[in-house]
Amino acid sequence: MTTGSLHEAIADRSATVGVLGLGYVGLPLSLAFVDAGFAVRGFDVDQYRVRELQAGLSYVDDVTDEELQRGLESGFEPSDDPSVLADCDAYVLAVPTGMDDAPDMSAIEAASRTVAEQSGPGETLVVVSSTVYPGATREVVAPIVDDARDAPTRFAMVPERLNPGGEYAFGDIPLVVGADSDRSRAIAEALFDAVVSETYPVSSTQTAELTKTLENTYRMVNIGLVNELVSLVEGMDADLWEAIDAAATKPFGFQPFRPGPGVGGHCTPIDPQFLAWRARRDGTELSLVEGAQTVNDDMPALVAERVERLLRARGVDPADASVLALGASYKPDVGDVRNSPALDVLSALPEEAAVVVADPYVDASDVPRELVRDVTPADSERADVVVLLVDHAAFDLHAIGDAADVVFDARNAMPDDVAADVVALGDLGDDPTADSRGEGLLLEGE
């Protein structure tokens, strides 16, 4: 705990930062603060996870072992003992949240109590970087901390904007900084200006919370729109994927989103539910948001049904089928399976079917079927159908498509020149032996 001004301590890097939660958000953030010159103490309740970190082993896709080891050498101190957080100048809450009938803020509440118990007597900054419903910083975090502290506490909400497996580096993504007072906002901006190229201040913690939920609700609703069109185009002489690409040539007013087996990860499926819950609590409703959520939630079952329809059209009983499923994570090139629609598709396929899942990133314990890391030509040849659920860059789609007999492509990612018959979402109409592109889908034996 610094004895001078908190703002000055942040500016000259003499401040100590405590990060609560060392997962996909907290670990990269901790290392970014270390790189910026701060002393960083990390706390997580998962003892096994902490032991891995202390040994220099990273479980986060976007953090290498080498990056973690450099952070440890530079003073990053991960622990499962909350006393490691004693007398920090700034605390960042990066713990998980969830949604059942109402938002699950239990980890946020526990983290707030830990901050209240471990914080020192001086001015302290408390930042919420967990995804929460609009109002949670004021309603959940602030009362717990304020009730236990006599010293000034500055609260801010800085929602995470990580892009696991994506093209944007942590420091290149602008961060929104919301606070309910000018001083709190200025202190929080100073802290995060140290780790990203740009911060964008907003007038309140609720505005920052709304920003986060809006970003992912926008994405979820637009994915729901194109997913809802899948069943429509099955009865038309139209290609949905081609229509999306054509619409995207308009230089204004349209942003392309594409169908798939659903939406996954933590933020996109959960954030809209936070908004809808808050609306219901306030006596209103977000019918568009809730409708889109239902469409996306139904997509894994729709994909599984279309795979079964395709198998029957080829004379194969789905219960007796051999299925090779490509991908189990929620998005390409990561091992994160949180709310993965691919896993929901696998669960919806007949239990009796012989399903082999190929994924180079996920843990076998996360997959309810047999898991292989690499796809051999024999794997593709023996399958009655190959189902592409996640288009990992590690998959050689040309080789898979040339060895397979038929591919159900839920991502429209298969190359055009493969030998297999390729069926995409929207291709199976009333006649499952012909796709909407007019290429024809041969039955077995034809």
Image (cartoon, grey):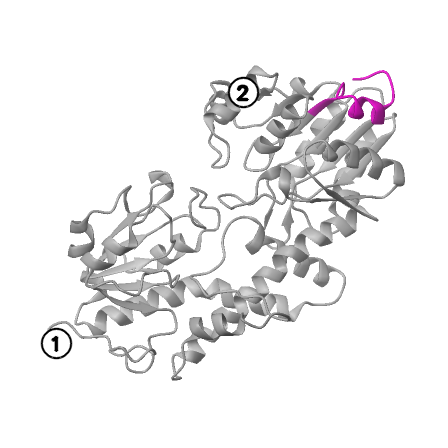
Q: Quadrant of the N terminus?
A: top right
The residue furthest left is: 445
Q: Amino acid at mark 1?
A: Glu
- Residue at horizontal 52 percent and vertical 28 percent from the top: 46
For marks 1 and 2, the one nearer the N-term is: 2
Q: Give yes or no for residue 12 being in the magenta stretch.
A: yes
Where is residue 390 shown, x and y percent of the image?
38, 53
Q: Quadrant of the C terminus?
A: bottom left
Where is residue 220 shown, x and y percent of the image?
57, 61
Camera-side residue of 184 and 201: 201
- The residue wearing badge 1 is 446
**7 left or right, relative to 396:** right
Camera-side residue of 237 and 184: 237
Camera-side residue of 431 and 11: 11
Range of the magenta residues? 1-17
- Above or below, 74 relative to 209: above
Kind of element beneath mark 2 = helix
**62 left or right, relative to 271:** left
Residue 50 can be seen in this image = no
Residue 308 occupies quadrant: bottom left
- Residue at horizontal 79 percent and vertical 19 percent from the top: 120
Between the residue at mark 1 and the residue at mark 2, the CA separation in whole angstroms equals: 61 Å
- The residue wearing badge 2 is 70
Q: Amino acid at mark 2?
A: Arg
- Above or below, 260 relative to 118: below
Where is residue 60 shown, x and y percent of the image?
49, 34
Q: Residues within 10 Å of mark 2 (few under 14, many from 20)?
A: some
